[in-house]
Amino acid sequence: MTAARRLGGWAVRNCAAAVSLLTAYPANRLSAQDTSVVDRGVRVGIIYRPGVRPGVVLLPGRPAVPDSVRAIVARDLDYSDRFEMITLPGGDSIRLGAAASPARSSERGRTGGGEAAGLNYPLFQALGADFAVALAQAADTTVVTLHDVAAGGVRREVKKRLPPPTSPDFRLAVHRLADQVLQASLGAPGVAATRLLYVMDGKVWRIDQDGADKKLVSSSDRQAMSPAWAADGRRFAYMEFWAGHGQLFVQDMATEKRAAVVTTGAALDFTPAFSPDGKTLAFSRAIEEGTDVYTVNLKDNCCLQRLTVGRFSDNLSPTYSPDGQRIAFVSTRAGLPQIYVMAADGTDQQLFAPFDYGVTGSSNAPEWSPDGQSVAFHRDVAGTLQVFVLDVRTRTVRQLTSVGRNEDPTWAPDSRHLCFVSDRSGYRQLWIIDLETGRIRPLLQQSGARLPAWSPRLPETAASTP
């Protein structure tokens, strides 16, 4: 095979090269970037107006809540990028409470807000807080109280019996508390109770969105890559190398049981993508004649269908639109790889992301946003890769990154956060950027991570560790 092929974000020229890319990783570290600026939240390609986000303060616990719960909730609220986090002054000079007025006492009776009557709302208004979050422990129950500072009362109270800190379900349960705070305060669903898959050392790993609880989830004795989540958050698909071929597997997150995908494994099958209803798996198949996009019926375990016919070009890396009606993919039909789109049955294939022939570099790794409005991908710019976002309606693209090499973007379920691979700190690691504020932060400060895949919001029944 002579045409370049993309295997999860890596261009390869034959199956042997694909195997070598999986087993070898560059040992040399790149020159360091200005990470001190990046860590403070460098904003690139985004217009940001500071001071427009509501302020939130996490109140001291009375009685104390385990530090791990408080730390996780505070980090989740911060990482949502929807609040200005307010830190209370230290020492004993600040008085959080105030004498309860009769009116507020009656309000406390209506809301069951506990300390609502005694909270010093004018103080928190002066500190710039719109909301105050109190965590308390009542026997074996954690109580989260959301105070609306401007209204001077309790907005919501949530009571939750958390698993013990040693339980594999503990962190997701706490993440869900943070998501409930976000939902109650701003009416927006959070992404705290989500996880990411990624590849390191030829294995698939899983990690919480806050960078904790890393765990191996693929087989430990075979090279694996191209992880992809099902829309229900209960399964994921990935490719393993078997005797020089790429075999696709679907694995249950809770039970760790997996099954080989029918009709795959005889060729190099890679980059799986679930349809939104979970019944179909699209993937790339590379044979001597070329690489094309196929689908297989997972529900009935049958019915292989070829969607593209290369004819001296390669077509690969499918990604479904959220309504399941269209598939974006990579094609080399115009020369260098670029982003195309087609109907889910393979008809109406056309260029999706515009490019300047002879000027624009190759484009790879498309992923459709959960809200359907954007497609993220990476493109070669002057010899290095940068992350771009395509507006689906206008078909205009904008460059999102500019520092270092940046590739393989994946969307959070809120369609405003992206995880991607970047060497901006001197070595390739996972980073997260918020498209609204431009804030960027490292997810995993460990060299060699690549090919991230962000989960949907995880259901309660999937809380157990995979």
Image: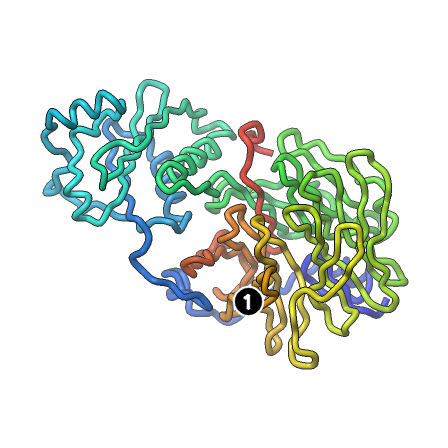
Residue 439: percent from left, percent from top: 41, 59
Residue 331: percent from left, percent from top: 76, 65
Q: Is residue 330 above or below residue 104?
A: below
Residue neighbourhood size for the residue with mark 1, other residues' Cα within 10 Å, grouped as few (<14), some (14–19), many (≥20): few
Q: Residue visible at 86% across and 41% down?
A: 303
Residue 321: percent from left, percent from top: 66, 51
Which residue occupies the extreme top position in the image?
A: 139
Q: Is residue 35 left or right of residue 429?
A: left
Q: Residue visible at 82% across and 47% down?
A: 242
Q: Residue visible at 66% across and 40% down?
A: 230
Q: Which residue is mark 1?
A: 29
Q: Is residue 462 left or right of residue 154?
A: right
Q: Is residue 397 above or below residue 347?
A: below
Closer to us: 37 or 342: 342
Identified by mark 1, the residue type is Arg
Closer to us: 362 or 444: 362
Q: Quadrant of the N terminus?
A: bottom right
Residue 461: percent from left, percent from top: 57, 27
